[in-house]
Amino acid sequence: MTRRTWPLLPALSTVLVSLAAAVLLAVPASAEDQERVSAVNPVGNDISYPQCTASGWDGETYVGLGATAVPSSARFGIVGVNGGTAAIANPCLPAQLAWAGRLPGLANQPRLQLYVNTANPGAVLREFGVVTWPVATTAGNPYNAVANQPEGCTADGVGTNTPACSWQYGWERAEWAVSLVDAAAAEADVTVNLSATVVWLDVETSNTWQSGVTGLRNNAAVLEGMTARYESQGAEVGLYSTRYQWGLIVGGNLGTTRDLAGLDSWIAGATSLDAAKSFCDTKPALTTGGEVTLAQYVPKDLDLNYSCADRP
């Protein structure tokens, strides 16, 4: 995704702006914009906090719609729920949900989709004073040492770095993201039915991850926990990354429960429409059994996404 560089788990400083309606500043349409919305180029955009021009977030909840720059031409929109990390809110999420909800969509790409930041800070809990680490696992956590028996995730006030706690971290970060979407949708007066929504897990090295054999296992567990939370509400979950970043973060490790196998992929890394089209056939899915359904390219300053699933 088009993003700024953020430090680890920063506090977002926002300016409160209360608006009666979402302010959408359209980016002028170029010749390429006009071409890509034609029948032969099924392309949409993803946007998030870098496009925010004013905030609707007061640090705790949404109290306004915020304002955002948006593409003037798009067939579908993928809106980032977070503000750069899994612990920060996108300050203009309501305005961006409203924008995507008005797009036409494609046969295989819903007009409004979501993406969420992912991470695993389990190895730096003491160093950075991470406050989002779970206190304990739930009985249904598949990585519990004893089935249906919750485990503690803190010891002497510091988080415990285990696969079970990593899975729980993913579940709880996903649960928080769901609450953000619910609050933003209510503020924007739009309907977001998670059971009919695609949620992409944004897996990138710019966020905090663990390394080594155990670390890759824990990273996979985080993504499994997030997947389980969204799928529990009927959402369709997909994976966004490059093959290189995926290899560094997860590798071939799909976790004990293998919930990541079969998920569709949104592949990044192209710089042109032609390159993105080629990704549909030349880039393998991030996990076995999945398909590459989207390919991202960034020719200038906005992220464009070619729908492999809607090729003419």
Image: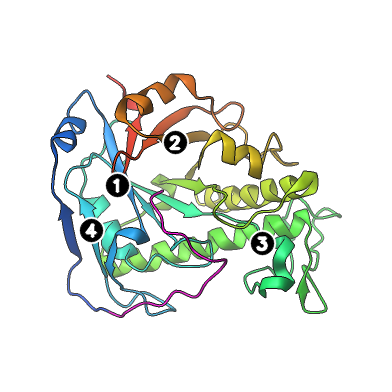
Q: Residue furthest right?
A: 146
For label 4, count other residues whose C-alpha is less than 10 Å away and answer few (under 14), some (14-19) or many (20+): many
> Which residue was labeled with disc 4?
69
The residue shown at (51%, 61%) is 85
From what the image shows, is residue 29 above or below residue 19? above
Cα gap from disc 2 to disc 4, whole angstroms:
23 Å
Mark 2 or 3: in front is: 2
Q: In terms of secondary structure, where does tag 4 sit? A: strand
Tell me if label 2 and label 4 are in contact, CB under 8 Å.
no
Q: Amino acid at mark 1?
A: Leu
Q: Amino acid at mark 2?
A: Gly
Mark 4 or 1: in front is: 1
The residue shown at (18%, 43%) is 73
Magenta span covers which residues? Answer: 1-16
> Which residue was labeled with disc 3?
121
> Which residue was labeled with disc 2?
269
Q: In terms of secondary structure, where does tag 3 sit? A: loop
Is 42 within the magenta?
no
Q: Amino acid at mark 4?
A: Ala
Q: Quadrant of residue 22?
A: bottom left
> Which residue was labeled with disc 1?
302
